[in-house]
Image (spheres, grey):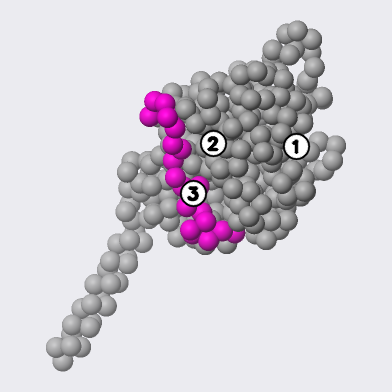
Amino acid sequence: MRLRVLGIGMVAGMLVASNVKAQSMPSEKQIAGIFDGFATGKTPGLAMLVKQDGKVVFARGYGVKKLGSASKIDAKTNFRLASVTKQFTAMAIMLLVHDKKLSYETKLGEIFPEFPEYGEKATVRQLLNHTSGLPDYEDLMDAAEKTKGKIWSPEKQIQDAEVLSLLEKETKGKFTPGSKWDYSNSGYVMLGLIVAKVSGKSYGDFLRERILAPLNMTDTVVFQKGKNTVANRAYGHSKNGDAFKETDQSSTSATLGDGGVYSSVDDLSKWDGALRNHTLLNEEEMKPALVPAQFGGPSNAVLPDDAPAALQGVNVKYGFGWFLDPYKGHERMWHYGDTMGFKTAIQRFTKDGLTVIVLCNRTDLDPGALATRVADLYLQAK
């Protein structure tokens, strides 16, 4: 009898504990309350998704894909990811390391023998974690146009090969490779070019064959204007006063490894699941991506002035395609994207089993801040 009573007590205790946990989890109303009011049926907006312990617990779209359209944003709407692309580029490199076609210590000059002395000794690892010191290709574009006049535009966008050409014409980098940290789009363009050269396939084909198709990310695409299309896509917009205007492409919208992927929150949920379950690389192979950059200069890695306003000057840690600094004591992998017409964010709290993704087709919202507000609801409930 005593054992039976004890058993009943244990079951009751478990039910009470389970009920308390269930009651403490945020409601759909609480989550929706963070996003309600940002968009209408006539304005651009956003898509967002929340996963807890591998399960989607909330996914919703707000606003329209394009001004003047009645086509509403939903979980399958594709947005330009901008710098959230970098984690896919990093994974592509890691898969080539897995294939033994590359190592993290391979030097840039070994892959591109014509690369100038200032960067030839930069390693793949340094490119991945932003310690290569390569010049900013947008700065090089500005310098070229000051002497030669207008070269690039939204209609005539700079291509990866042109970025390489600009870098090869330079005689010095920002710093000696490995001595400092500096967020580098040039480094990730070069990584995209490395993927293509080492694999013998285009960057887009390699991602499709090795990442997107195996994960059934059927809507995700490496967009190349004039070569392919983006199904079910959102168009980018900017706000001027109280009005929006379409601002979907710029002169730098065609580069690939640093920001060329389009995807949806639905497909990114599959990506998150692959990371959680080590579908593409085993846990040991993934570890290098989660080691913060090591460099010989000042210990702080600080986000630049062209980062989202709330992040400018913020101290960060960076691995391979992921920021790794914690949030309120919770381990976190995260990244933001910020480009013409789009802002994006993914936040993964790995030990808490929580992922929040926010994709915007307008530039007046802060998806990272919105994602952390959602995360707060869950982290405070623990």
Q: Mark 1 Cα within 10 Å, few/some/many (few <14, many 20+)?
A: few
Amino acid carrying mark 2 in the image: Gln
Q: Which residue is mark 1?
A: 69
Q: CA distance from mark 2 to mark 3?
A: 12 Å
Q: Residue furthest left?
A: 2
Q: Position of residue 245 (x, y in %)?
A: 70, 24
Q: Which residue is mark 2?
A: 126
Residue depicted at 32% across the width and 43% down the height: 329
Q: Position of residue 110 (x, y in %)?
A: 67, 38
Residue depicted at 84% across the width and 40% down the height: 227
In the image, residue 168 sits, relative to residue 336, either above or below, namely above
Q: Which residues are magenta?
A: 280-301
Disc number for residue 288: 3
In what element is the residue under mark 2? helix
Q: Position of residue 167 (x, y in %)?
A: 69, 24
Residue depicted at 63% across the width and 55% down the height: 100
Q: Mark 3 Cα within 10 Å, few/some/many (few <14, many 20+)?
A: some
Q: Is the C terminus in the top left, top right, bottom left or bottom right quadrant?
A: bottom left
In the image, residue 191 sits, relative to residue 134, either above or below, namely below
